[in-house]
Amino acid sequence: MKVSIEVNGKAVTEEVEDRTLLVHYLRENAGLTGTNIGCDTTSCGACTVLLDGESVKSCTVLAAQADGHRVMTVEGLAGEDGELHPVQRAFREQHGLQCGFCTPGMMMASVSLLAHNPKPTREEVREGLEGNLCRCTGYHNIVSAVIDASGQEVDR
Amino acid sequence: MSIVGTRVVRIEDQKLITKGGTYVEDVREEALTGAVHAMFVRSPIAHARITSIDTAEALAAPGVVAVYTAADLDLGPRQAGPVVEPWLASDVVRYVGEPVALVLTEHRYQLADAAELIDIDYDPLDAVASIDAALSDETLVFPDMGSNVVQVNGMPEFPADTFDGCEVVVTQTIVNQRVAPAPLEVRGAACAWGEDDRLTVWLSTQNAQIGRTLLAAGLGVGEEKVRVITPDVGGGFGAKIGSDPEPVVLGWAAQRAGRPIRWTETRSENLTSMTHGRAQQNTVTVGGRRDGTVEVFRLDVVQDAGAYPRTLFLPTLTELMASGVYHFPKIETRSRGVVTTTTPIAAYRGAGRPEATAAIERAMDLFATEIGMDPAEVRKANFIRPEEFPYKTKSGANYDTGEYAQALDKVLDAAGYAGLRAEQRRRREAGEPVVLGLGIASYVEITGGDSGGESGRVDINPDGTVTAYTGSSPHGQGLDTSLTMLLSDQLGIPMERISIRHGDTDEVPKAIGTFGSRSLQLGGSAVRQAADKVIANAREIAADMLEAAPEDLELNVDEGAWQVRGAPASGSVDWVQLAARAEQGVLSADVWFGEGSPTFPFGAHLAVVDVDTETGKVVVRRVIAADDAGPVINPLAFRGQRHGGLGQGVAQALLEVMAYDPDGNPTTATLADYSFITATELPDFELVDSATPTTRNLLGVKGIGEAATIGSTPAVHNAVVDALAHLGVRHLDMPTTPQRVWEALSAKGEAK
């Protein structure tokens, strides 16, 4: 079937199998490999992208379901001029990533979290990111990164 | 102004936060054009005889390029310790997840469809799904071995009179449960044979060079015929050391099918087929006096090696580190490695040392409880004192440096220990349903314990930039940044003019890699040594250019220029001028740093937990940690390693377990079932600084990658038991899940 999605502001139209998952559409049809796959049970959040501005796990969305919709991936976070999004800047500044595999999904989830709760507490960040797993950081600096991105002081 | 020791944001991150990394599944190399997709068909049964395999239907399915079984393979035998581990199982399967067949299809989605159509008949055999089942020898995993005990080390028999004369003797069997390393990136590979009859493998690994050696050996070709390239790696934690059987089979299949191949396992495969960690059952016995002095410690280790005992050094490493941070007059150890019909066990963050620490630190608490002494005081009464270093333990370890008592004191002070004990008493007296527990772990561990060296090469390029090649294989540790900082400091060249290369066997042919927290002390020392040689050669050229004696010159690192000592006005030569003047290769040095012997990081952790006696739920309120690995190159990366270690260590104590039912079926085989710790279950970590240098390498550093994991597991474990001590609970095994806690309380009649 033909699936057309606006990915990071660009129109993409591809002929795909009906059962194609959004994450594979993004990685293989749109050629954007920043979005990762870390599990097969919608548990890890490595594949989190924004669908019409809301975070979704793209391993559990059919590409067909996103037909005619807008998707943003990690590749679309920074500005045209390369200026980093506040979340990207904060993840780097706060050392919120190590191996980097969970990072794209973690950042997209954080963007969504901050859209809903612009000034979260550390506890609220932890709860908001419960669906995104990280094996490297112990989450401490990821929480700090989201606090930093929200414009609040990081005190630990 | 030296940048070493200052917090530097990582150079690795720009790519990772904008485009995402290039992990093996992201590799888009021309050599992989037209690659087929691969999937291993794995045993769904723990122990069975294969009576038939029918691939006809699968071969006829859409997009299927090939189906291979053991009957097709013509590879030599693969040893796993004393037994042969098949590349693909042919007659008997020995764990759920063992590879039996390989399917190749044109498109990814055709894999699972085709795999479903392969008809394999299994005739079930009795499972050996636990250490106790293995020790009984009722069913043998390898009948030819005559026993499931495939390795014995240490004392064959313990003397009967060891504890005679001790005022107090306590003993306990402690389960150090099996856990899944579960890196966020599962295993994967992509491989292609070139027209030069050479195999290139992009492999998610911690050491490409050893991977190359194992691949070449497996395929029966010379090492020059195999190139391994490590792209970005999404975590390894010890479980991506070397090479599993799969890449060898894929290399063989790529040749047989005449097509490049891409392979990425599923997470469910990863949880059952990637090696697991820990899986020990340890019996500790402490003999001592009522004043808190321990006189003798005995550790009896049983290591579940899984179906194929690939890594039997783990229990012996546990024995080596048995006595921890204590000056024990007498130690007795033994270890046995047993095979079971479960996933093979190999290294996982700490690899043998967490198990040793968990055993001795639980033992010290049991001893303290028995004599009615505070666990902190018991530890202080037995610590090895600073003036005793270098200290040879009775179990054969040679500790370099340590400030064990000081580390614990720092943590107790930072935590407000006395106040916490007062709060605990208050809450107990008030009969509150949520009780407070405090758990201490003092630990020492061994890094660079393999005693191998590492390679390092530094080139000053003709334009004055620097390219350094390391045999280490960083995948999240921030080593690129740390090495760049060290080189910038040493050479006086700005960080942005330095680049670090690693992980391609054509660029770095000789290396050992990243594991055992060895990278900075060995890989870093190698790069340091190479740069020293480059500086020595540069001195000669600069002397020639400045018409001065080499010994009168100095490198002004603030300016990045050579000048006459004490007479800077008489002229200088910078690296760009030097590089232009130098003959090719003169400003290049390639070294093997081999003199690095193991180092012994140490520390102390205090965990503060709340335990709800009505539900059994444990909440980790605080973790206060001192982790001493000598001088710190980049505090940002150093703290990051500690955070990650704490996260994984707390996870084992609190939640994680890779479980099997009595028939050997894994019951935690997806991330929906496996209790991978999340952000909501961990607190913010409180880090306490401590830095005691070592004398055993050029940088004075010890490894930090595993330290915090090793300390935090017993700290949390001890805290949970401590919370319940007044209710009569003396011990419960990890993970300290609500059910476990509630059952322990029920047994005492204390569950609400």
Image (spheres, helix red, strand yellow):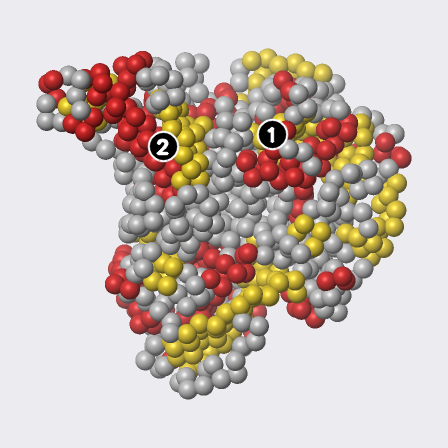
**Which percent across, then down, holds residue B45?**
77, 53
Q: Residues within 10 Å of mark 1 (few under 14, many from 20)?
A: some
**Quarter placement of the N terminus of chain B:** top left
Instruction: Tell me, yes or no, if residue B135 can be seen here.
Output: yes
Question: In terms of sequence position, does the residue under pointer 1 or pointer 2 come before the other?
Answer: 1
Residue B224: give its label: 1
Location of residue B220 with respect to B171 vertically, above or below:
above
Residue at 65%, 62% (x, y): give it. Answer: B150
Q: Could you tell me which secondary element the residue under label 2 belongs to?
A: helix
**Mark 1 to mark 2 CA distance (whole Å):** 25 Å
Of helix, strand and loop, which one carries label 1? helix
Instruction: Give percent across and percent down for residue B719.
Output: 42, 64
Please state which of residues B144 and B608 is positioned toward the viewer in this rendering: B144
The amino acid at mark 1 is Glu
The answer to whether mark 1 and mark 2 are in CB contact below 8 A is no
Disc ID at residue B530: 2
In the image, what residue occupies the spot 35% across and 16% down? B583
- For disc 2, the chain is B
Chain hosting mark 1: B
Q: Is residue A4 above or below residue A48?
A: above
Which residue corresponds to the image point at 57% horizontal and 69% vertical from the top-left?
A: B743
| Viewer-proximal residue among B113 and A68 | B113
Residue at position x 76%, y 49% from top?
Answer: B44
- Judge whether A111 appears above or below A140 on screen: above
Q: Position of residue B655 (x, y in %)?
A: 53, 55
Q: Nearer the viewer, residue B360 or B659?
A: B360
Q: Where residue A25 sits: x, y (%)?
A: 65, 23
Q: Residues within 10 Å of mark 2 (few under 14, many from 20)?
A: many
Nearer-the-camera pick, B489 or B475:
B489
Q: Amino acid at mark 2?
A: Ala
* Quarter of the figure with residue B25: top right
